[in-house]
Image (tube, rainbow, N blue to C red):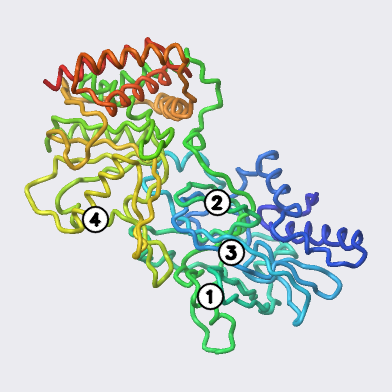
Amino acid sequence: MVGPQYDLVGNPLGAVRATFERTAAAAAAESGGADPVAAFRGKDWGPGDLFRSFLFEQDGLAKVPVLDASNLGLIKPNTLVRYRGMVQDMLGNEYYIGAFKDGSTWRTNKYTDFSPFSMPHPCDSHLWERHLFHCVPAPGQNSWTLESSPGPDVRRMSNCLAPELREKRKRDGDDDAMDVSENGHGESSFCKKPKEGDVHVSSSSTEVAGTVPEMNGGDHHIPGSSFSCLVKIYDMPESQVKLNDVIEFIGVYTFDPELAAPSDNPDDIMLDLMEDVTVQLPPSKVPRLHCLVWRKLSSHDFISRPVVEPSPSLLKGIRQSLLSHLTLVLGNDELAAQCLLLHLLSRLRNRVDVVTVGRLSLNFTGFNKESSSIFGNQLYSLIQKLVPYSQAIPLSIDYLNSATLQPRKDNKSGRLVTGVLQLPQGTHLTFDETLLQTGSLTSKGVENTMLLKNLMESQKVDYDFEYYKLEMTADVQLLTLSEGKSNILPSDLVVPFRPSSVPTVNAGAEETESWRWFLSTVRSLPQSTEPETYQMIQDEMVSAMRDDRSLGCSELSRWLTMAQIMASSFGERSLSLEHWHMVKELERLRKQRMQ
């Protein structure tokens, strides 16, 4: 274990190298002169455990600055940072010289873009591999989630502050002798790019600049994005990180402006990199993060409420509080509030062939432009405060004809160009159809309409790879506000909206936090049905179909989904006849209203 003389936040690479050299020396002594680092390929020799212990057992996470657009120019390269983002593109693998022999000592270039030491040529070396991911702030991420895990003020952290800013503060003290960000004696290491396979090779160089120009520079692949990050992950089995995952990465932040421009020297190894997709992400505009520790984020990770046992009695109390508030927001329409609560608690639980189990899209009818500006705005404002990711989409003819909903692969650059429907799991979308007027859809408008229908019916989005379509699964909650039943977005549940008052309500911060916890907890509860109960429900379904020939399998399946969500909303993990009958009563009132 590395001793306290290493600053794991201000100088993480010092600890990485120290653990490597110590482990390599021990392995060399045991092997009797054989190559001691050959077994290190694709494995963690110790720094991963070291940083996990520091971050999660010694409360070190709160000491790590959060990398974002607001503080990027303040953070010194080669310090430890946190970055939360969605995997927008998977850029394949990159080969790099992971270890080389310097005289009698083995050294490592892991977790860096450049060798911190002069690399003799020729020398014994090992070619290792890392995974590249282009990450962006999660689309539709609501502001309250950014407050759930604030980092320290970088301006007060002299060990992480960029050198020129540290001088402005007139702080005394020498820089750490092992601080590689101010290392001035490196030489370019030798890397050879394989001619086959979709891998990229990183070279090693020397100096790192201390300031960062404007970020992302209008990257056409990320419409509206002002900040992104190229994350490099090590020692990871394939498929652990997936497209559209929202992840917190903790690792070494690096920056190199020289890679942003091609070299004039035909013998320069940098020319070999110009075919890389990373050329579209110049280090002068897109920072690199060499990941030491990462974890996928769920809605619970954005909630600051203390961990408590989700007992039925506790959940019932919060459920009633949230239901009462929803009723007020919806103008005292209790039926609409009950259905909205079930909708907010729905999630995709399973896929059976083309059937999606657990989804519950909702269509409120009876809206016009005036009521949408009142109730619709109030409703969306509340949804923003309750869920981590949400977007409101004004569904008009112009929007359908012009919006880029479908993500597509740009085969010239090798990059995935994002679309509106590239979303993190659990996103809530609110569509306002009251803006629709008479008009003609172009071919793009028809394509966008089909994309939305496919998302609504199968929870899938077709990504355009030019020569073929790639179906990507989704888990998105869909709410439509329309005057009549929507033909563009065929929802699972259609409810006529009948308000009797205008909402003028506001919830307190503590109350809102409890509702977030309730929604996140209930959505994660497992759900089952006892065989006896299931048989009785099945008998009632058969009887209902006998009485009403218009009932189909899809509607009965929706009833069962609603009953399971209803049970979960009371904190119950098993469906009972009581919850089934509550849903049947809701259905009776809904159909009565639709007549």
Q: Which is more N-terminal, label 3 or label 2?
A: 2
For residue 187, which numbered disc appears in the image? none
Tally of marks? 4
Name the front one of labels 1 and 2.
Answer: 2
Q: In the structure shown, which secondary structural element does the residue marked by tag 2 occupy? A: loop
- Distance between the Cα atoms at labels 2 and 4? 31 Å
* Residue that badge 2 annotates: 239
- Distance between the Cα atoms at labels 4 and 1? 34 Å
x, y percent for residue 48: 70, 50
Q: Are marks 2 and 4 in contact (CB under 8 Å)?
A: no
* Residue that badge 1 annotates: 259
Q: In the structure shown, which secondary structural element does the residue marked by tag 4 occupy? A: loop
Q: Amino acid at mark 1?
A: Leu
* Residue that badge 4 annotates: 403
- Distance between the Cα atoms at labels 3 and 1? 12 Å
Q: Nearer the viewer, residue 428 or 588?
A: 588
Asked whether residue 78 appears in the rendered view, the answer is yes
- Residue depicted at 66% across the width and 53% down the height: 9
Name the front one of labels 2 and 3.
Answer: 2
Quarter of the image holding residue 265?
A: bottom right
Q: Which is more N-terminal, label 4 or label 2?
A: 2
